[in-house]
Amino acid sequence: MAKVSELKPEKKISAPSRLEKTVTLTIGEIRDIWNGMARLANLIGVRFIFTIHANRERLREIAQPLEEGIKPSPDFKTFQQEYAKLRREYQDDTRPAPPDMEAPIDPARAEEYRIKAKALEEKNKDLLEQRQKQIEEFNELLQEKRDVIFLAIPVSKIPREITAGQVQLIMPMLQDDLEGDDW
């Protein structure tokens, strides 16, 4: 399991050229932009798509390690499987569950289930504490700020087909139109 402290790249950035834009974002915002950039793939415009791809590459060194940093350890995954198995043993299969939800615990066996679940949690107390600490550190990391240099996208070059959600995603990359239109 990667430690959250190992996911803090501290790369110094140089001054941007006039085709670039420096923006201060939280690591959480960088992660959201990284994850959302695939939604831009169907837009038209070679230069626009190239710029989006280049900006995504600039985010890679920050965003990619984050996915590793929040993954549960193999031991925690084993605990999750044991917990799910225990829950399935005590489910009330006669009461239908809403879609994408588990069936409720059989009320006649609920107390026995609670005792066994509590014992399983107690047996794995250290593991649960480690996972909680990992999540807390990860959430703190998401609040940290980083300067990012994007290739700027002139507002006039945004494809007509873009949706409001897609515009929201690229807002940090947008800039007023450049003089001389070098873009």
Image (spheres, rainbow, N blue to C red):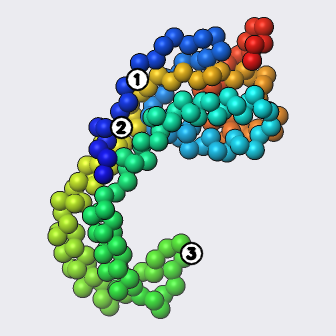
Which of pointers 3 and 2 lies earlier in the amino acid sequence? Answer: 2
Q: Nearer the viewer, mark 3 or mark 1?
A: 1
Q: Residue at x 24, y 85 (%)?
A: 112
Q: Tell me the distance, in whole angstroms, between the alpha carbons under discs 3 and 2.
A: 37 Å
Other residues around mark 2 within 10 Å, as few (<14) / some (14–19) / many (≥20): some
Hey, which residue is sitting farthest right in the picture? 160
Q: Is residue 159 left or right of residue 97?
A: right
Is residue 66 shown to the viewer in this render? Answer: yes
Of 110 and 150, nearer the camera is 150
Across and down, in percent, residue 83 comes to 31, 74
Q: Which of the 4 image quadrants contains residue 152?
A: top right
Identify residue for label 3: 99
Badge number at residue 93: none
For the point 48% across and 87% down, which residue is it? 95
Position above or below: 183 against 163: above
Q: SS of the residue at dot 2? A: helix
Which SS class for mark 3? loop
How many neighbours does mark 1 have within 10 angstroms: few (below 14), some (14-19), or many (20 or more)?
few
Tell me: residue 128, above or below residue 11.
below
* Residue placed under numbered mark 2 in the picture: 7
Element at label 1: loop
Residue 176 at what x, y percent from top left? 71, 16
C-alpha distance separating marks 2 and 1:
12 Å
Amino acid type, label 2: Leu
Residue drawn at (17%, 59%) of the image: 126
